Image (spheres, rainbow, N blue to C red):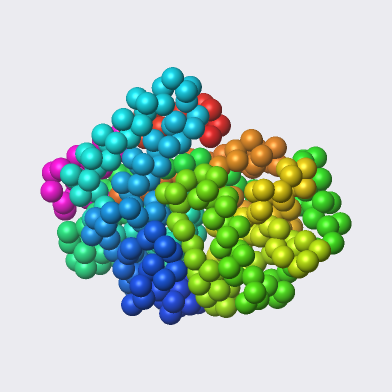
Amino acid sequence: MSAATTGAVDEFNRASAAFAQLHVGSDSQRYIANLATRVEMLNVGELSLPATINEDEPGNAWVCSPRTAYADYAAEEAVRYAPSWAAPALRALGRFGARRLQRARIDRAVAINNWLLSTNLYPPLAATPLRQLLDAARQRWPRHALWLRSLNEREHGDWLAQLQALGFELIGSRQVYLYRDVASLARRRHNLAMDLRLAAKHPGRAGNGEIGEADYERIAHLYRRLYLDKYSACNPHYRAEFMRQWHRQGLLHFDGFRDRDGQLLCVAGQFRLGGCLTTPIVGYDTGRPRREGLYRLATACTFEHALRSGETINFSAGAAHFKRLRGGEPAIEYSAVYARHLPRATRRAIAFLAAATQHIGVPIMRRFAL
């Protein structure tokens, strides 16, 4: 391996060790209220990869439940963007799909490199022996489908090609937004430049070192107001303990802005690996006037980090128009799924999802810039 690849592997394994210390052998609901899963580590080559193991538990957040992701959450999104007259039929279709996927035991699943976040970041492919990974996972979990989430066409084209060659199906998930050269974008994109100026002059900044014990409940509350109350209960319901322990372990870097009384108005939590930043935790007081620009302030913190470090940003999905205005490049994200060793019903369900998303879901995401 090159020196750069070795350094990336060392960084990845340090983060994996911190993650394992928190989650291996722990009750997942201590950290995420709507997630029942078991966390183990899979050692392949020089890497230690987190994996979540599920046995068809009901009501799980979409980060561990394909049924929630591709039936419940997909139906909610379809209703949100479709004409109102179509809503009853779409909801019925979602319920029908959920029943079909449940009968196929779609949630008997192992998700490899699953960090319990909306967007997982990956080690270099050069350091990841995929055939060895597949063989080890099949031997260890012979009754489970094997999933790798968060692989997008721009950053992981080589991963997707090699996984398909090994027999993985590709299931379209979301359209995410990438920022490769934030310094250049800040000069060319008026909206991004305005956000950075807004953040620079705001008097209430709270940097990572200024976030402490009094803030974790507030961060969890602000996240919940945005991701669960405004968007969907299918999103992971992170507790204050998740915010506390991930911050203390260095897995999340928090930035926010406070009001005059010292209470956080908005916050962003960045997770970074291998030259990429993602922001799985964003929250703001949704009851405040829109003119205060709290979402703009929170996201500006991530742009500031990328300006200083030169890292790429993966800003996940959602708020597509906002992200495009700031120069985000759309990229379709996929889950790669291996199920050739499983019963026919499960194989057929996964093949159906792959075909439906490739021929219907992905074209809709591209057409409507979702």
Name the residue nearer the viewer: 321 or 289. 289
Q: Residue at left 80%, top 40%?
A: 190
Residue 262 seen from this side: yes
Residue 276 seen from this side: no
Q: Residue at left 38%, top 45%?
A: 69
351 over 54 or under it: above or below: above
180 over 46 or under it: above or below: above
- Percent x, y of residue 182: 72, 51
Q: Residue at left 73%, top 69%?
A: 207
Q: Residue at left 70%, top 75%?
A: 209
- Percent x, y of residue 173: 42, 42
Name the residue nearer the viewer: 281 or 178. 281
Number of callouts: 0
- Percent x, y of residue 126: 44, 62
Residue 346 magenta: yes
Q: In the rendered view, does 165 fall on the left or right side of 193?
A: left
Residue 44 magenta: no
287 over 266 or under it: above or below: above
Name the residue furthest left: 343
Q: Which range of residues does the magenta coloring cover? A: 338-355
- Percent x, y of residue 106: 24, 48
Q: In the rendered view, does 353 fall on the left or right side of 177?
A: left
Give residue 217's quadrant in the image: bottom right
118 over 36 or under it: above or below: above
Name the residue nearer the viewer: 249 or 60. 60
**Majority secondary structure of magenta residues:** helix
Give residue 104's quadrant in the image: top left
